[in-house]
Amino acid sequence: MNLLITNTQEDQAYLILQCLRKEANKIIVTVSGSNLFKRWSGLSQWSRHVSKRYRVPDVYADWKAGRIQARNSDDEERYIQRIEEICAAEDIDTIFPSYDAEVYIFSKNKQRLAGQGIVAVVPDYNALTGILDKSLTLAAAEKSGFPIPRTAVIVNSDDLAVAHNASTGPWILKPRCNAHGANIIWVSDRDALEATFNNLNKLQPSPILQDFIPEATKRNYYLVVDRDSEIVSLFSPEVLRTRKTGVRSPCAAVVSSTDVPYLDEVQALLRELGIWGGMTLQTIVDQRDDKPKLMEINPRFGHNLWYRTVLGMNEPLMFLRIANGQDPGPAPTFREGVILLDPMWDLRHLIGQVLDQTSEFVRVTVLRRPRHRERPSMESIPQLLGDLRKEYFSKRDRVLSPLNRGFLSDPFPPMIRMFRVVAEAFQERWS
């Protein structure tokens, strides 16, 4: 096959490239984004396995504004036409996106591309809309019996008043359509809640209000699902440590496990949605009732795809086979009890915490100003260092992210990643 990989600013694009390069005659990538740093710090475009890269226009504005519709907007049409030009020039027969907005756009143009002999490795549009809009996902979960936090879609101030009176808070306000935790806001009182709603409602109408779940323990389900909505690959590790970054707490250290809770409920939810493909189902375990509460489903592979690739699970190839109407092959197996660690992300987080605590100390103690954040993204640095020591020097079986190695076989991607993760730690704090 001749493969086109998009959204090269994301790490998962490079992991997909690594998983499929032996299946491809040639690999072409696209580069996009108005942020120069993000655009040129993506790993895939610098791989020696890439034959050529093309610039494409930004296409995220409509999706970020929550405008989910079957017809292409003007921006989306320009994007698809550019993709068609690239496919014609390079004789592309397979396109593999892995970012929500592009998955959405390729999904609704899937038949158009198929008419040109091009397979877009994405789910069907009708099922996908129930996942891209988080309010629809949560409604399907409630219908299928999967636990969710107390949730309300807030259209106006009256809805906000009703939701406020039904809960004592604190709350989470977030857009119905987003990725990477963008514009998710923690709020603790009514006055701030109304002001936050008004601001968020301008960015994307009808945001979601949820009860905040304290003392969060994450449990993610990394899945490949066939066209009958049956699970064919499942990886759901136990979380040892998260990175506390305000409201968000992405996984930092996990251990492989075959003891998976609420598996029947996960399967029931997938059938209710009628979805297939590669995806991540994200939950937070509520310590008050010990139930995993659904946050969202990402209908694509994320940057934690390396958890599976480093254990020998080739999920992109399984997804590709399903998209081509083929048997995905036997369910992959993996070693139990393996600690999975990413040294570069841990270094980035450590730098970020030092910067946060230093700036907060100067702000409060030296300048005598109030705290910069209502809920600072801080944790004890000694505790973090202690956790890192226990994990990295544990006698247990452990593996490190493959994104940090390959200097001899494919040198530029790991070099760029080393530079990028440190630069991003500073960029996030002072942007």
Image (spheres, helix red, strand yellow):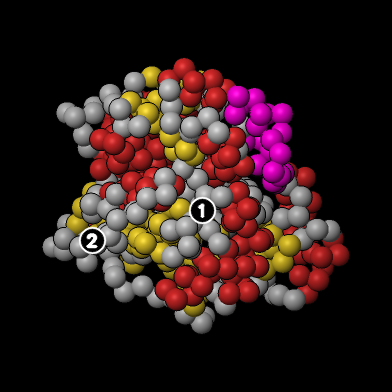
Residue 418, horizontal then vertical, whole percent? 31, 33
The residues bearing labels 1 and 2 have C-alpha atoms spaced at a distance of 23 Å
Magenta extent: 60-81
Q: Amino acid at mark 2?
A: Phe
- The residue lying at 69 percent from left, 63 percent from top is 209
Using residue 23 as the reference point, say whether residue 143 is left or right of it: right
- The residue lying at 63 percent from left, 53 percent from top is 126
Query: Which SS class for mark 2?
Result: loop
Q: Amino acid at mark 1?
A: Asn
Q: Which mark is residue 334?
A: 2
Question: Label 1: which residue?
Answer: 298
Q: Which badge, 1 or 2, comes first in the chain's sequence? A: 1
Looking at the rendered structure, the number of numbered marks drawn on it comes to 2
Of 354 and 128, nearer the camera is 128
Using residue 182 as the reference point, say whether residue 358 is left or right of it: left
Of 313 and 215, nearer the camera is 313
Residue 349, horizontal then vertical, whole percent? 39, 47
